[in-house]
Image (tube, helix red, strand yellow):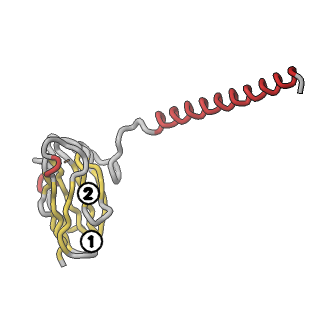
Amino acid sequence: MDEQRAHKLLLAYERGWLAFSMLMLFVFIALIAYTLVTHTRGVIPAGALEHVDPTTVRTEGPFAQSGVIQTGPNQYTAYVQAFTFGYLPNPIEVPKGAEITFKITSPDVIHGFYVEGTNLNVEVIPGEVSTVKYTFKRAGEYRIVCNQYCGIGHQNMFGKIVVKE
Ligand code: CUA
């Protein structure tokens, strides 16, 4: 192979890699742009967007009573406050086999609402209502754990759900 041909081959090889890296650059910029466009509307809590005033949530509206309300023949809504450092009501008492709609909000900072032994796991954001439905098939006690760091008492933030026969 003469020197001229080897040089041409090398040039073609270089151009190939140059084109590839330019293409990757374009792909990454496009991905960043896509993320910026689609993920800048804040954190969206579980369920539909529903707002409450975190400053009055303890004293006014359904969360002030924080309890379980029967809404149908076998349906209940549990209004729950997650606060530093606990849950209200505590325990949350619900019947076995009923469809429970949990509506959870926070009067202070972001908390977690994870129920051990279930797939119930939502973030609780002040000013927003997180909504999840669940049906407990076994009676007994379930521990609620806060899995969002919320301050000095975070590791002691627990609640309890009592499922009755
Ligand atoms: Cu509440 Cu961590």
Identity of the amino acid at label 1?
Phe
Looking at the picture, how far across and down is residue 48, in whole percent?
35, 51
Q: Is residue 157 left or right of residue 130?
A: left
In the rendered image, which quarter is residue 56 located in?
Answer: top left
Nearer to us in this view, 158 or 36 = 158
Q: Is residue 119 left or right of residue 7?
A: left
Q: Which residue is mark 2?
A: 114
Looking at the picture, how far across and down is residue 10, in whole percent?
78, 26
Nearer to us in this view, 63 or 150 = 150
Looking at the picture, how far across and down is residue 118, in whole percent?
29, 65
Residue positioned 30% across, 56% down in the render:
121
Residue 119, relative to residue 33: is it above or below? below
The Cα–Cα distance between marks 2 and 1, rounded to whole angstroms, is 14 Å
Nearer to us in this view, 158 or 105 = 158
Residue farthest along the top direction in this orientation: 4
Q: Is residue 66 left or right of residue 117?
A: left
Q: Residues within 10 Å of mark 2 (few under 14, many from 20)?
A: many
Identity of the amino acid at label 2?
Tyr
Nearer to us in this view, 65 or 14 = 14
Residue positioned 13% across, 46% down in the render:
153
